Image (tube, rainbow, N blue to C red):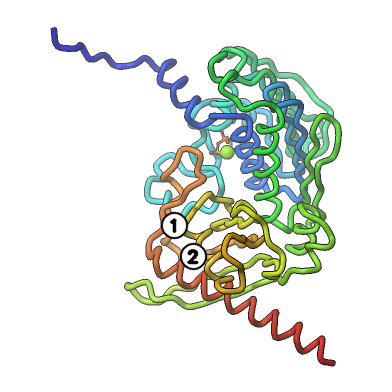
Amino acid sequence: MPPQLTRLDDATVAEIAAGEVISRPARVVSELIDNALDAGASRIDIAVDGDGTDRIRVEDDGHGLAREDAELAVQRHTTSKLAADASDALTAVSTLGFRGEALAAICDCATVELVTNDGDAVGTELRVDDGEVTVSDAARGQGTTVTVSDLFADRPARRESLAGPAAEFGRISDRVAAYALARPEVRFSLRHDGTTTFTTTGNGPRDALLGVYDADLARQATVVEHATDIDTGAGTGSLELRGVLAYPSVTRASREHVRVAVDGRPVEDSGLRRAVIDGYDSLLAGDDYPVAAVDIQPPSGAVDPNVHPAKQEVGLRYRETIEAAVEAAVGDALSTADARRTEAAAT
Ligand code: ADP
Ligand code: MG
């Protein structure tokens, strides 16, 4: 007998999609931070209990939401970041979010409490539990707090596939560090089981490095701000790179301490990471990797953020040219810093 094809019902489609977006607790944290940054937050406080399935709370001082918008926000494919007919705008999207599915997906796999205020006298508390939404008044200053609890309570297999509290929190902490370094003008704090893991001041890249690592490392680093014209084949475009590069004398055994963001979005992009490492070139011994965090702004039209459900990879046009420019910019910044230090030592 040939197989019969059937069309999945909406609930099943939604559940499959939610499982793709929210693969593990660190994804919840990333999506909530994206939303806080898109809301223009200058301060983001993150608290995690256990492996993150117990509780994740992200608090921001962004623009907040009016009650009717908060009620819309938890529904699927509702966004304030794209117009309804925006397929053209997808390549030019400047916000971290645009699909309108993160909050809905999180609500599908957890209990969610959203407390928000857009500057009104009274705020709104929205609780979504098993698809049931309750709304009430809440006292809160402007901004939004999202608390996610009992993640994957209905998905025992997903829950059991998680790597344990230390490893899952490690992933979360690494994500928060990546955001803190990519957005050094925002104050971040991360707490785990009531204890502060790190905080940053929002006073620029060197301070972010200090928060995520320590004062010693922050002293042994140079801040880079660089703009180059690159040939895109269709004319010239401007590539900007900013961030912080630890001196080559500071090394790590793994490449994970080389962090790359594109347009302020932390990405896992092995090509760009390789380009940064290659910028250190012969300054590093064989198996050593540097500590670096750079945010790359490619020419407009060069980035497609919409290639990956978790948006952790981006599609890049003129990739080879961009990687070469990144490598050169890192090399330049390091040799300038080195010359400056040699000069300072001589006087
Ligand atoms: P997206 O970010 O792709 O738009 P989400 O499901 O993550 O989709 O969020 C839906 C909408 O909820 C957003 O477009 C935004 O208007 C609103 N929202 C979510 N989180 C916040 C927040 N922390 N502060 C203000 N608005 C928020
Ligand atoms: Mg979002």
Q: Is residue 311 left or right of residue 10?
A: right
Q: Is residue 294 left or right of residue 205?
A: left
Assess disc 1: are there few (<14), some (14-19) or many (≥20) residues with their C-alpha within 10 Å of its C-alpha.
Answer: many
Are the two marked residues, 2 and 1, in contact with CB atoms closer than 8 angstroms? yes
Residue at 41% of width from left, 45% of height from top?
A: 307
Which residue is the site of mark 1? 303
| Looking at the image, residue 173 lies above or below residue 55 | below
| Looking at the image, residue 283 lies above or below residue 138 | below
Residue 174 x, y percent position in the rendering: 67, 44
Whether disc 2's CB lies below 8 Å from ligand 1 is answered no
| Looking at the image, residue 132 lies above or below residue 232 | above
Residue 167 x, y percent position in the rendering: 66, 33
Q: Quadrant of ligand 2?
A: top right
User: What separation in Å lies between label 2 and label 1 (alpha carbons)?
Assistant: 7 Å
Which residue is the site of mark 2? 298
Which label was assigned to residue 226?
none
- Residue 51: quadrant of the picture: top right
Determine whether the residue tagged by mark 1 lies in a helix, strand or loop: strand
The quarter in which the C terminus is drawn is bottom right
Residue 208 x, y percent position in the rendering: 76, 57
Q: Amino acid at mark 1?
A: Val
State which tag comes first along the sequence, 2 or 1: 2
Viewer-side residue, 93 vs 138: 93
